[in-house]
Every structure is written in structure tokens, then in C-alpha cells.
Image: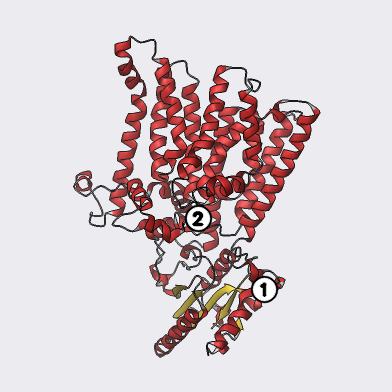
Amino acid sequence: MLVGLRSRKALLAWILLVLLRLLIALTSTSAIHPDEHFQNPEIAAGLLLDYKSTGNALLKTWEWIEDKPCRSIAPVWGSTGLAFALLKRVGGDAPSGRALFVAQRLWMWLLSLFVDCSLWSISRSSLTLLLFASSPVTLTFLLRPFSNSLETVVLAVAFLLADRILRKTTVKLGRSALLLLGATLALGVWTRVTFVAFAAPLVVAVALHAAQTTSNEVWKRRPLAFALSVFPAIASFAVTAFALIIVDTAHFSSSLPSSFPLSSILRTPLILTPLNLLNYNLDSSNLADHGLHPRYLHLVANWPMLFGVGLWAAADAVWWSSKGMGVAKEGQLRRGQLYLASFVVPPLLLSIQPHQEPRFLVPLIIPLALLAPSASFFKLGTSSARRKRVSFWSIWILHSLIFTALFGYLHQGGLVPALLKLNDELRTPGLPFLGGQKGVAAPAHVDLVFWKTFMPPRHLVLPLLDDPRSAPSIRIADLSGAPPSQLLSTIHSLNTLISTFKESNISSNILLVMPAYLFDAAEKELSALGGEVDWWPRQVFEGRTFGVHVDMDRLNSVVGASWERMGVGVWEV
């Protein structure tokens, strides 16, 4: 319980933070990392919706290649797959990109509430809830369909089940929780193989508890008693893992018939996606493609970036407990040790791998929210403690505001709004935004060229229509950070195809999507290359740009740009 804060006020604060979380989920259109789209909703949309009429397929990244896939399809079906299935049932077979965006964000918001419920069931502490609900991790990463976000939800459930087991006087009394824990651990590993690192302290704690509660057995029978006590967890883990293997094998094995019996699957080489991902990550040449980092990056940069002053509260809680002043019961001490181990051990294990991104540490918000309330300044009522509480909350809230503004709204913040606008216009028969006659559907082909942006998620831009015959054919060229010379050659290549479409009475347009503040510099560079820059005659949407597009790799270009040029623009070539 917060010192000096009534439970009714804490409840009101939590409700307001949950509503703020919902608002951010529906309005934050930044792109933290392409994986938030390509590890989940892009795959789910391809499974549930028919994009054939657009002349384009959704993008499958390296993780989904069929010979050695590294991602299980089960977490996709359990998250955005369910969201899109419900949307399809309610809104029909041709949802807009905006509807898909809202559906996935609403679903992730609902999943984040499971974490709130788990933390409350474990701690019964309003402070734990407020720390989690106001954290920058919750307001950004957990509202996006990252595999790391799903890993966090599964870890919260695992913490809840482990807590139920550890509170029992004997493991035998927690058999149902053990069964669920085993299944949850398997699901976590198949969500992300790094779940092993986050769950390791929980598994050790449950195993030690089982060993201690069977210590009164006859010595010769003690190993047998221990094995029998943890058998429900081992059995449920094995059964769930086997079921996930069957699901993945059935999904990725294209040689199987559409109505596959179990015997056909068992005759097919089984696919273990966590093992494939582990083998991929053990090859340093593979990691080099994604970026190699110093092994101390998690501890020195990513830890404080995500949790900020929360590290101070965690350290103070450890000091307070070590003095014997922060806990009164042995059970509370053991739980504090578990939370500490769960916060420290995973980043140490993950630091072995030289590819380290901040989102890899997102699940640590669970043990931090459980550990930090044990800090001395949350326990004491002295004037010094009150000053520390004020300092903590001031820095914590400021950190959350800055982090949420940057990564929730500004970072690559123009791409998704531009995609949603393009999707709306491409769904309008006749394509009036390109000069066509509104409501008169005619054969049309549109090339979308993306330059100096993140990879565009296709499911947010490709138009789905109730009448597929009226849908324009779309082709996407993603140039990422390519040099101007490649942009020039791409435009010239596309221009040579326009005559072919005109001969078939098909209207053809080329649209260039790029940060508006790079336009003038790109025009000069292309002129220096001898390019014909008069093929950029018109900025569509009446010169409007979308969002505020902050590119961390090109901050020098953002600084000094006019407000009208801060977003992503669309030019008709």
C-alpha cells in the first residue's frame, strides 16, 4: 500500500492510467521497430485475409522461411490472429488498414490488462500496479504486437502460477498450478526462446520448494518423492511442447494435404522453431546481419533506458532487505530474493549474445514492479523517505513522458499515418486522389516506392475491397536507406513499364513515399546525378505530410526542418 495514499485514490489513479494506456494504444502511430509488424500482424493478416486481388503478397521476413522457420505460428494465432478473426467476423472480409491497426492495438491493450491482474493477484499492492501502469515499457512496447510483449504476458502468468505453488505448504497441494505452469513455460519458450532466461529463476525456486517440502520423506525415497511432486509440470510442459510442434509442423510443411491426419504429420520431419532460432543466433555471421553490440550494452544502456529510476528503487529494496528491515516473514524474504534474481539473472544471461536491443529486456518490468515497492522510502514515513518518494515519482513520470513521446509518437512517426491514408484512398473506386473519377472503378496499377523509412507493413496499406475486381493492382518497392542513385534507377525502371499499362488501357501511377524534410536535399543530389527531377511535379494530398517523423539515424536532417516538412510526404511521379 502506498504510504499516505488511500486505496480509493490508488484505484482511481490506476483506472486513469489504464484509460491513458488505451488512448496511447489507439493514437500512438510511431514505429519502434519493424518487428512489431513483421513478427505478428503481417503474418496473421496473410493467414486470414485474401490479398490476391491487390496483385501483391504480404511480406514474410527471414524468421518465417519454410525450410527452417524460427517463429512459432501459435503465438500469432493467439494474439493478432484472434483479433483479426473477430474483426473479420464482425466487419466482413475486407477490413481497412485502419481497422486492422485498431484491432491489433485493442487486443494488445486487453492482453496488458492480464499483466495488471497477475501482478495484483501476486502482490495485493497498489504500488505495484501503479509502477507497472505508469512505466514507459507498459505505455509503449506492451501496446505493440512484439513477440517480446507476448513474452511479457506469458511471464506474468508464470509468475502468478509460481506464486501459488510457493505459497503452498507442500507441492502436492499445488498440482493444478504445476500443470498450468508447465504448459505456460512451454508456451513461453515457443513464443521466444529467450523466455528460458526469464523463467529460469522461477523454475529454480519451484524446484527448491519441491525439494524442501519432500525433505521429510525417507532418504532413499526422497528423489522419487521429488520427481513425483514436479511430474505434473514436466508432463504438461512435454504435452504442450508436443502440441506446439505439431501445430508448427502442420503450418510450415507445405507438402502436407489440406486435411492432414495426425499420422501424416508424424511422418513429416518435425519442426522445432525455438531450436531453429537458437541455432540461428549461435551463428555470429547471422547476428552480424542484425548488428553486433558490446556484451555490456544491456547492463550499461538498455537497463537504464527502459527502467530508469526504477533501478534505484530495486537497489534500495535489496539493501533494505539485506538489513533485515524490509521483510518480516521468511516467505516474504524468499519472494524478494526471487524477484531480485528474476530481475538480475536474465539480462546477465542475455548479455552472452552480442546482439542486444532494449526490447529484449521488456519482460523485466514484471519482477521490477514486484521488487521496487520493498524500497525503504516506500516503507517509511520519515521526512527523508517522503523526499525520496517525491524525487522517485517525479523522475519516473518524467522518464515515462519523454520515452512515450519519443517512441510512442515521434520515432518513425510519419510512416503508419501515411500508410493508413494511402489505404483509405486506394480503397476508393476510381482513385480520385490520383485524378480518377470518383466512384467509377477502372483497371488501375499503382507503384509505391518507399525511401528512407522503415519497412512498410503491407497489411496496413494494401487495399481490400468487397468487390475484388475494383481493387487496384499494387506493387511495392522498399528502398529503405538506399542511395539516391538507386532511387533514380528504380524510378526510371518503373517509368518504362507505364507505356505497357497504357496500351492495355490501365491507368498507372508511381507514388514516392519519403520523409518530407529530405525532399530538397534529395532533389539536389538527383540533379547532381543527372536525374530528371521534373518527375516529382506534384505532392499529393494537397501538400499534406503525415505525423512527425523522427529518424534516429538522420537526426541532423530533422533539426532545422520546418513544421510543414516534419512528417512523411507522398509525391506522384
Residue 436 as seen in the image, left or right of residue 184: right
Near-viewer residue (62 or 420): 62
Q: Quadrant of the N terminus?
A: top right
Residues at marks 1 and 2 touching, judged by CB atoms closer than 8 Å: no
Place of residue 417 in the rendered image (x, y in percent of width and height, measured from the top left): 59, 65
Whether residue 306 is visible to the viewer of this picture, yes or no, is yes
For numbered disc 2, what is the local secondary structure?
helix
Residue found farthest to the right: 383
Q: Residue 481 bears which disc, if any?
A: none
Residue 226 as seen in the image, left or right of residue 147: left
Residue 200 as seen in the image, left or right of residue 377: left
Q: Callout 1 environment at 10 Å: few (<14), some (14 to 19), or many (20+)?
A: many
- Residue matched to label 2: 36
Q: CA distance from mark 1 to mark 2?
A: 26 Å
Q: Callout 2 environment at 10 Å: few (<14), some (14 to 19), or many (20+)?
A: many
* Residue 389 quadrant: top right
Place of residue 50 in the rendered image (x, y in percent of width and height, measured from the top left): 40, 63
For numbered disc 1, what is the local secondary structure?
helix
Near-viewer residue (66 or 279): 279
First of labels 1, 2 by sequence position:
2
- Going by the numbered disc 1, the residue's amino acid type is Arg
Q: Residue 565 bears which disc, if any?
A: 1
With respect to residue 324, does 366 lie above or below?
below
With respect to residue 483, does 292 lie above or below?
above
Whether residue 125 is visible to the viewer of this picture, yes or no, is no
